[in-house]
Image: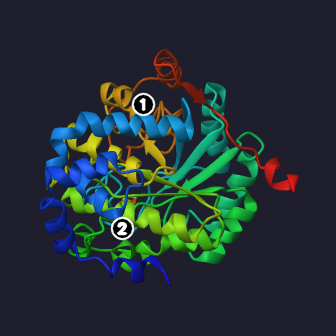
């Protein structure tokens, strides 16, 4: 069974009706329940829960402290390529956008990575558009083999691959896989992915399963907030994360909350998510999935990111550039989207400290694998 079978148990409209039908009583039950169940999770995502957001946030803070302590794991992306065969309407790398594109050579990747290493990062995320002609499995394995000498954790956010290719990447030293479904609403998915391989909803939906089968140590899922109504989208994101947690117990499951940002092409979110909605989503997910990692990127503003640190977040990117060569090259290729928090990694780390938390640059070493 894959998540394709699991998601069939849920109907978008029924979930919408269930969430919108939740009462104050349902929300109170969820807030004070010893063990939060799926019904409670839906109550926490409901309009009725908005009045109790402060209490929900307080609970989310307590639970995150219990499970993760006062730590925020730091990471940064390295964009390998802005070439792409897809035409996702919301993305700056959409093949129809007339932008300068680039795929970095190994030497350029290493130079970019050195900038991040010098800033203190030991966890990096390799990001690429879908362009298998240049971003081949061999290209990726070669990069990872070289980066491993400097980084304790290497994750990928690239195009979906077969399980065997993922196994090869794990063997070469990749430990994390990030893949966002973008939207779990199949109709919306089709309308924002008009062409290219990404049009295949099921292929993408089953990608985290293939990652689990390939034994990635970390798997990170999420939806691109703004593409579909957020309450049901968040419910299905939670269902996906819960399914993966139960099935691939060797992988630690995290959830990201990418919210649409301005990008080349000028796509406007049809279902905007306010900052208050955003806080509600994060806290509701924390209350239901107490051990899930929660990842926050520089898409969000400095102020919101600072306020979210105590509420449930466990990992943050900092000082990010979203173009290949963005850290070093002056004739910069265009980025995938505009970031909002443009503080340096050092400044973000200082803020984390000032809030009583510890920025963690390294929480893992492959040597642990050899210990047993
Ligand atoms: S979201 Fe990814 S697959 Fe789609 S156009 Fe952008 S880089 Fe390509």
Whole-angstrom CA distance, mark 1 to mark 2, is 34 Å
Q: Residue 8's spot in the image, x, y percent?
A: 33, 82
- The answer to whether residue 79 of the structure is visible from this angle is yes
From the viewer's side, name the closer residue of 364 and 91. 364
Q: Which mark is residue 30?
A: none
Q: Secondary structure at mark 1?
A: helix
Ligand 1 closer than 8 Å to label 2 CB: yes
**Residue at 34%, 58% in the rendered image:** 223
**Residue at 39%, 34% in the rendered image:** 311
Number of numbered callouts drawn: 2
Q: Residue 262's spot in the image, x, y percent?
A: 25, 43
Contact (Cβ within 8 Å) of mark 1 with mark 2: no
* Residue position for label 2: 86
Q: Quadrant of residue 115?
A: top right
Mark 2 Cα shell of 10 Å, populated few (<14), some (14-19), many (≥20): many
From the viewer's side, name the closer residue of 268 and 35. 35
Q: Quadrant of residue 181?
A: bottom left
Ligand 1 closer than 8 Å to label 1 CB: no
Q: Quadrant of ligand 1?
A: bottom left
Q: Nearer the viewer, mark 1 or mark 2?
A: 1
Left or right: 151 in relation to 252:
right
Q: Residue 160's spot in the image, x, y percent?
A: 50, 69
**Residue at 28%, 56% in the rendered image:** 97
From the viewer's side, name the closer residue of 141 and 58. 58
- The answer to whether residue 268 of the structure is visible from this angle is no
Left or right: 243 in relation to 188:
right
Mark 1 Cα shell of 10 Å, populated few (<14), some (14-19), many (≥20): many
For the rendered model, the colour scheme is rainbow
The image quadrant where one finds the C terminus is bottom right
* Residue position for label 1: 309
């Amino acid at each position: 069974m894959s998540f394709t079978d699991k998601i069939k148990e849920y109907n978008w409209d029924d979930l919408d009706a269930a969430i919108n039908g939740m009462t104050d009583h349902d929300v109170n039950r969820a807030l004070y329940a010893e063990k939060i169940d799926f019904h409670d999770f839906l109550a926490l995502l409901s309009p009725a829960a908005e009045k109790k957001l402060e209490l929900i946030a307080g609970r989310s803070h307590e639970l995150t402290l219990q499970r993760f302590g006062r730590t925020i794991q730091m990471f940064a992306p390295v964009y390998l390529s802005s070439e792409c065969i897809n035409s996702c309407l919301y993305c700056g790398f959409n093949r129809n956008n007339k932008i300068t594109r680039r795929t970095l050579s190994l030497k350029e990747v290493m130079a970019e990575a050195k900038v991040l290493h010098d800033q203190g990062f030991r966890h990096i995320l390799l990001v690429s558009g879908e362009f298998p002609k240049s971003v081949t499995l061999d290209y990726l394995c070669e990069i990872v083999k070289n980066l491993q000498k400097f980084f304790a954790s290497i994750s990928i956010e690239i195009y979906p691959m077969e399980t065997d290719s993922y196994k090869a990447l794990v063997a070469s030293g990749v430990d994390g896989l990030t893949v966002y479904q973008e939207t779990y609403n199949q109709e919306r998915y089709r309308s924002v992915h008009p062409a290219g391989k990404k049009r295949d909803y099921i292929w993408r939906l089953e990608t985290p399963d293939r990652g689990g089968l390939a034994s990635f140590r970390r798997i990170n899922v999420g939806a691109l907030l703004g593409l579909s109504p957020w309450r049901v989208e968040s419910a299905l994101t939670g269902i996906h994360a819960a399914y993966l947690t139960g099935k691939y117990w060797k992988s630690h499951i995290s959830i990201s909350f990418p919210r649409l940002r301005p990008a080349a092409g000028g796509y406007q979110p049809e279902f905007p998510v306010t900052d208050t909605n955003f806080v509600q989503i994060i806290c509701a997910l924390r209350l239901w999935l107490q051990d899930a990692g929660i990842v926050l990127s520089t898409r969000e503003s400095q102020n919101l990111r600072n306020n979210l640190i105590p509420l449930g977040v466990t990992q943050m990117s900092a000082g990010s550039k979203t173009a290949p060569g963005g850290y070093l090259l002056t004739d910069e290729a265009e980025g995938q989207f505009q970031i909002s928090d443009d503080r340096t990694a050092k400044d973000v780390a200082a803020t984390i400290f000032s809030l009583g938390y510890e920025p963690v640059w390294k929480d893992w070493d492959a040597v642990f694998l050899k210990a047993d």
